[in-house]
Image (cartoon, rainbow, N blue to C red):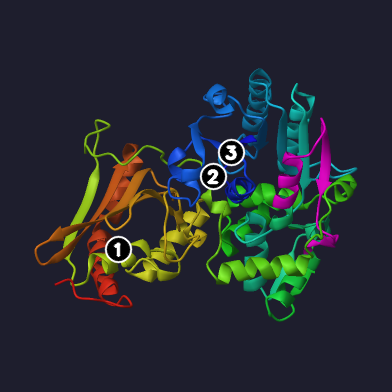
Amino acid sequence: MLVLVAGATGYIGGRLVPQLLDAGHQVRCLTRSPEKLIGVAWADRVEVVLGDVVDGSGLEAALNGVEVVVYLVHSIASAQDFEVADRAAAVNIAAASDRAGVRRIVYLGGLIPEGETASPHLASRAEVGQILLDGPVPAIVLQAGVIIGSGSASFEMLRYLTERLPIMVTPKWVNSRIQPIAVRDVLTYLMAVIGLEGGFNRRFDIGGPEVMTYLDMMRRYAEVAGLRRRVIVPIPILTPRLSSHWVNIVTPVPRALARPLIESLKNSVVVRDHDIESMVPLARTRYDEAVRLALASIREGRVVTRWSGADWPGTPSDPMPTDPNWTGGSAYRDERSMPIGASRAATWRAVEGIGGEHGWYSLPLAWAVRGLIDRLAGGVGLRRGRRDPDRLTLGDVVDFWRVEEIDHGRLLRLRAEMRLPGGAWLEWRIEDAPDGPVLNQRALFVPTGLAGQLYWWSVWPFHGVVFSSMLRNLANAAEEQPGFLPAA
């Protein structure tokens, strides 16, 4: 079939597309950011269409000839009023699918709590599902709870809280009943219902084989990870708002994303409808095995997609300006060059490996403080890390930067996603010279208003130290690469 995946750049979408291709389907990807798919392994096997489900642009071209739409769009990490955006997007995709003659829409939502007021996050997921079910095209809505897999936001919260806090004072939501599910099982169910025979128009609950509490999940994570038993003391006074601040400090998940996730943990979410278990026979993955698989992927650097791949609200999306007066104002630069006594390949390996576990090659304490300040201001901070410790693709996250442009062996440009009164970019370009490669480094800041001007001049005295040592240490790292060969 020709399958349209809306949300192919997201956590689930990026894992589903290669499975669809391997099963023999043709895949078309609808995305607001086509450049994010340039570097992925399956990019040359799919058709990419520029469009936006929220404003409806590009939907006609994207849906032409499509039999099944897999709808994986959710605005929780990219819009403050995510409920409004998700409602508009669902209405648009339902109407456009009808006009295009689509046979089925498949949507991945969340389990709905019974007898409780759902959190805004879960309520929005339920509303989107209902809009699709009430629409003219038959829809299958899969409803999942906490997804356990390397790179998922829920798993990252669980992992960092458990690993970093041997003693925890926790809110009472740690006793809410949850039915976690392994990401591999979510993908299996999605693949199955895409090709399900019959005109189904209904919800299906999906979950793992065990009902647990978040308290159980943390304690059993500790066992699987080989940690000492955690001491966890629930108290009733910690609100989701206070908890999200704590998660913001301890884990890589920023407060803006942590809060809606934590609010959802107040609800008990378990599978009530088991129909899909007879329709899709599956030996569901037990929780301990799901954790083991996730940790193995992290240790071996095989994290295919991460929560941090989503666009972050409030960050610039325009490409780096080349004209210093592009806005009629100022663009401040710090530009440096250095000849490198190593091969171009070794120099590129050092540049491509920047950030994450390799660090920033200058004043680690200063970078750590800047990351902490950003977290406290509600930004993403440094702890997002990298998906792969050594290789980057377009759109990848590198701590509080994102890869805006990459030409392997020649150019790496990062766009800042930290909280700033303006836009910031950091770029390295390798050029050939008679005596070997030259590494050019450029930092650029485009201020917004007086606050931006004040920010630049307040940090300007430190740039000489930070950027000069960064370039010098990158050169040293290139010469220390395994298999190093002198440039000449």
- Percent position of residue 477, x then y: 29, 73
| Local secondary structure at mark 3 | strand
Front residue of 344 and 298: 344
Q: Is residue 345 above or below residue 2?
A: below
Q: Residues within 10 Å of mark 2 (few under 14, many from 20)?
A: many
In magenta stretch: residue 225 = no
> Which residue corresponds to mark 1?
348
Given the image, on which type of amino acid does mark 2 rest? Answer: Thr
Q: Which residues are magenta?
A: 187-214
Please name the amino acid that badge 3 sits on. Answer: Gln
The quadrant of the picture occupied by the N terminus is: top right
Query: Rounded to the nearest whole Å, what is the CA distance between mark 1 and mark 2?
Result: 26 Å
Q: Is residue 453 visible?
A: no
Circles 2 and 3: CB atoms closer than 8 Å: no
Count of numbered labels shown in the rendering: 3
Instruction: Name the residue beneath numbered marker 2.
Output: 9
Answer with mark 1 or mark 2, whichever residue precedes in sequence: 2
